[in-house]
Amino acid sequence: MEKKQVAFRIQEDLYRQLQMYALQRNTSVQELMEKSVHQILRGGAGLPIRLIKILKEAIENRKEEIKEHLLSAYQRSLRIDSVDDDSVIQVIINEFGEIFERESIKGILPNVITESKGYVLYEFNCRDVLDVYYKRVHFNGTDWDMPTKEMEEGFAEWLLLQGLVKEDKGYENNASDIVEEFYEQQVHTEGGGLGFHTYLKYIYQWSPKAFWIIKNRIREPYLALDDDELESFWTEILKRPEIHEMLEG
């Protein structure tokens, strides 16, 4: 069976089960899924056991098929700008199926999303729900725009433990010095060190403003880049003076 047919069957089967569940509760699948997504974004509390069971059973033996379907969708730069049945179902599938690794083909994944229920919303650009999510969640409960001294010290300590900076070099220097040192290690270490995904995750932890400057330069043309092309692209982006200005600020 062609992948397209497999993907359609998966989605159709799941939709049918969800439709039956929704009918029993005198609601629509869309309303049911929208409510479920908001519950998931709040940590999953209150989701009906039967709904969880339906969703788990629907994907139990189909994880690879679903993964292929979702991967091909966003490799084609699929844009989903609203919370509709299909995008929400994909969110549900991801959260209960655990089928994605927590790194993005886009090459950027905010630290907060790696530890949250926002991953597929991010991948599929479900902007309305993602906006709600961002308004709810703050990194470590702090203001997004102003990383705290504790966060800075924590990042410096992490760099030290990873051997990316040395204590005798003053590893608790300001953000610009530490991040530049980390960046140099990433660029010049064989194999890219821990990789640009990790580097950007920690840029986000330090300075969400700087992270969003980078993120906003990534658009559809870059989604299909292979690893070498993506790394080259990142290298150019990270040299930009405004990135370092934001880190210094």
Image (spheres, helix red, strand yellow):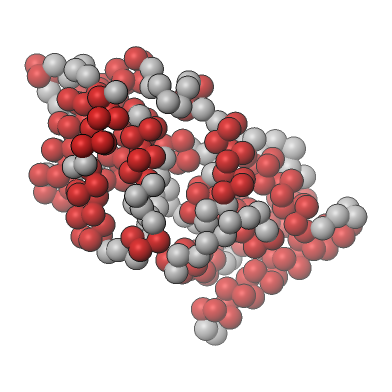
Q: Where in the figure is residue 18, as x and y percent of width and height?
A: 76, 61
Quadrant of the image containing the N terminus: bottom right
Vertically, is 25 above or below 117?
below
Asked if residue 162 shows in the view, the reply is no
Q: Where in the figure is residue 183, as x and y percent of width and height?
A: 18, 37
Vertically, is 97 above or below 248?
below
Point 60% across, 31% down: residue: 136
Front position in the image: 156 or 97: 156
Asked if residue 7 shows in the view, the reply is yes
Q: Where in the figure is residue 88, as x and y percent of width and height?
A: 64, 55
Q: In the rendered image, which quarter is residue 114 located in? A: top left
Point 47% across, 22% down: residue: 143
Point 52% across, 53% down: residue: 125
Q: Where in the figure is residue 190, as x and y percent of width and height?
A: 11, 49
Left/right placement of residue 215 relative to residue 242 reads: right
Q: Residue furthest bottom?
A: 1
Left/right placement of residue 92 relative to residue 236 reads: right
Quadrant of the image containing the C terminus: top left
User: How many numbered marks appear?
Assistant: 0
Point 65% across, 54% down: residue: 83
Left/right placement of residue 115 relative to residue 186 reads: right
